[in-house]
Image (cartoon, helix red, strand yellow):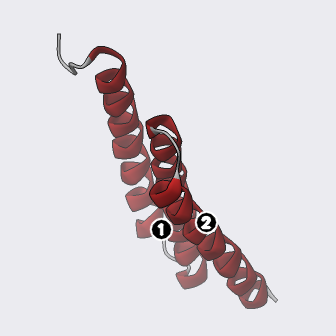
Amino acid sequence: MLENVLLIVFAMIGLSLVLNLWRLVVGPSVPDRILALDTMYINSIALIVLYGIGLKTQIYFEAALLIAMIGFVSTVAVCKYLLRGDIIE
């Protein structure tokens, strides 16, 4: 039962990644593209966590946590660069 649910959720998150990629390529403005990148790394974290659940191991949860921290910092840095034109003051 759990395997079937994992396959369905993998397919749904994969579809959301494809739609995010489409928004990244076609997005009419730069903030739309930044939001698409932010959503893509959140979806990749979800895929890593699901993979860890499927393999019943905990190492993937730590990897997802590291990606979440790096993704947050990079999103803040890109937004600050767009607002001010400089990351470090």
Q: Residue at x 64, y 74 (%)?
A: 15
Residue highlighted by disc 2 = 19
User: Residues under labels 1 and 2: Cα distance?
Assistant: 29 Å
Q: Position of residue 42 (x, y in %)?
A: 53, 53
29 sits to left or right of 13 = left
Q: Nearer the viewer, mark 1 or mark 2?
A: 2
Q: Position of residue 29 (x, y in %)?
A: 49, 39
Check disc 2 and report its element: helix, strand or loop. helix
Q: Is residue 59 something that shows in the picture?
A: yes
- Number of other residues with Cα within 10 Å of mark 1, as a class: few under 14, some 14 to 19, many 20 or more: few
Amino acid at circle 1: Gln
Identify the residue at the far top of this view: 89
Amino acid at circle 2: Leu
66 or 27, which lies in front? Answer: 27
Q: Position of residue 25 (x, y in %)?
A: 46, 59
Q: Quadrant of residue 72?
A: top left
Residue highlighted by disc 1 = 58
Q: Quadrant of residue 63?
A: bottom left
Q: Residue at x 61, y 65 (%)?
A: 19
Check disc 1 and report its element: helix, strand or loop. loop
> Residue 1, relative to residue 29: is it above or below?
below
Q: Which quadrant: the C terminus?
A: top left
Q: Residue at x 49, y 75 (%)?
A: 57
Circle nearer the N terminus (1, 2): 2
74 or 18, which lies in front? Answer: 18
> Residue 4, relative to residue 53: is it above or below?
below
Q: Is residue 40 something that shows in the picture?
A: no
Q: Which quadrant: the N terminus?
A: bottom right
> Residue 1, relative to residue 72: is it above or below?
below
Q: Position of residue 41 (x, y in %)?
A: 47, 55
> Residue 86, relative to residue 69: is it above or below?
above
